[in-house]
Image (spheres, rainbow, N blue to C red):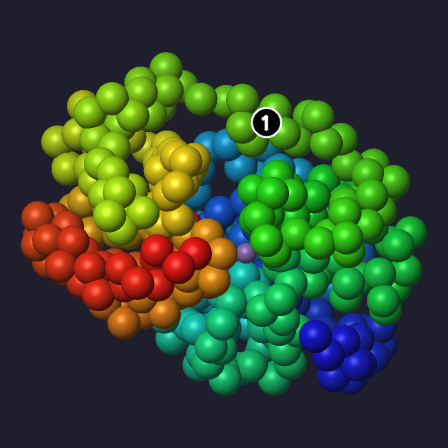
Amino acid sequence: MRLDTLAPLIENLQSGKYRKAVITTHHKPDGDAMGSSLGLYAFLKHHVHEVQVIAPTDYADFLHWLPGNETVLIYEEKEAECRAITEEADLIFCLDFNRLSRINEYGEIVRNARGEKVMIDHHLEPEHFQQYALWDPKSSSTAELVFHLIKHYFGLENISKDCATCLYTGLMTDTGNFQYSNTNSLTHLIAADLLEQGADHVGIHERIYDVFTPNRTKLFGYCMLHKLEVLPELRTALIYLTKEELEQFDVKTGDTEGLVNLGLGLKGIVLSVLIIDRTKMVKMSFRSKGDFAVNEYASRYFNGGGHRNASGGASDEPLERVVQKFRDTIKDYKEALLAI
Ligand code: 5GP
Ligand code: MN
């Protein structure tokens, strides 16, 4: 992480050079994407005249309580307005992604916009489209990077309660409640600072995790009982869902969040895969343990990527073909999976 490379940006920010800013984040934003974006928004609105958060697509209901959520525009729902705001912006922050293809067709609008671009991210293999970057693949979350930026240049006291709440949400969700290997002592120190700044960890936890609808709970139960497939010889667990099953449980955006973790909770399992027929495409989620680099696998076979232990991918092929391709290709990794 090179905070010093942002010094010219901060100088411009403090001198009032930027009047309009946009903050955007990735397709189907998760807790870190929205937490870091709205955390930065809560801070930036005191330094830039007009700030607009634009999400490329909708996102889970369990993120709608975040402070500032009511101001967010969704590109898919308001294309013309979002395009105009983006083209007028002096500054465009790209949070929690590092390739413009991750924000779909909105990516080319951002690429061609005149505003200076700032990429803040912790995923591997960035594309170079920005003037400024705060990039660290070792960082637990993008929320953590936003925290460092504000604390380093402006001081902890400039993190308001709303900002702390959003950043804590990003930190908490991307570390799986401080469970995954991206968590270290620094992550906990940051969490402590955010609690000091007013984040209510009990309330945040309840609003993110304790908000299942009956349908969502039944979907999880259905998957446990009927869909969870264990391939013990590969230490792998697999769940796949058809369009009809999604309809049966009236699945909404965010309802399948966490489902891939069911497999990883089984003793001895080091790779868990969730494959979902989203109609427009088949979407995949991968989670692994230890040094099994699931992002390399996702990138090689399913046009995807992400982190070493948490990645995603997609395919245009029918669901059955995708599932079969997974079964066929994963066999080649038997040795690596058994070695973990
Ligand atoms: P999830 O399984 O929760 O959707 O995604 C897990 C991680 O993989 C996230 O960090 C996300 O950014 C990344 N990811 C998910 N889908 C894709 C994809 O299609 N392409 C790439 N490059 N990364 C993805
Ligand atoms: Mn993230």
- Asked which quadrant contains residue 71, the reply is top right
Ligand 1 resides in the quarter of the picture at bottom left
Question: Residue 158 placed where, x, y %?
Answer: 87, 54
Q: Is residue 250 left or right of residue 68?
A: left
Question: Residue 313 placed where, x, y %?
Answer: 30, 59
Q: Is residue 335 left or right of residue 41?
A: left
When the figure is inspected, residue 282 is found, relative to residue 240, above or below; the finding is below
| Quadrant occupied by the N terminus | bottom right
Is 38 or 143 nearer to us in this picture? 143
Q: Is residue 147 left or right of residue 282?
A: right
At 38% from the left and 75% from the top, the residue drawn is: 108
Q: In the current view of this chain or complex, which residue is farthest to the top?
A: 214
Question: Residue 103 placed where, x, y %?
Answer: 40, 64
Q: Is residue 129 left or right of residue 339?
A: right
Q: Amino acid at mark 1?
A: Arg
Residue 45 can be seen in this image: no
- Asked which quadrant contains residue 91, the reply is bottom right
Question: Residue 259 placed where, x, y %?
Answer: 37, 35
At 36% from the left and 69% from the top, the residue drawn is: 296
| Quadrant occupied by the C terminus | bottom left
Q: Mark 1 highlights which residue?
A: 207
At 71% from the left and 54% from the top, the residue drawn is: 184
When the figure is inspected, residue 99 is found, relative to residue 337, above or below; the finding is below
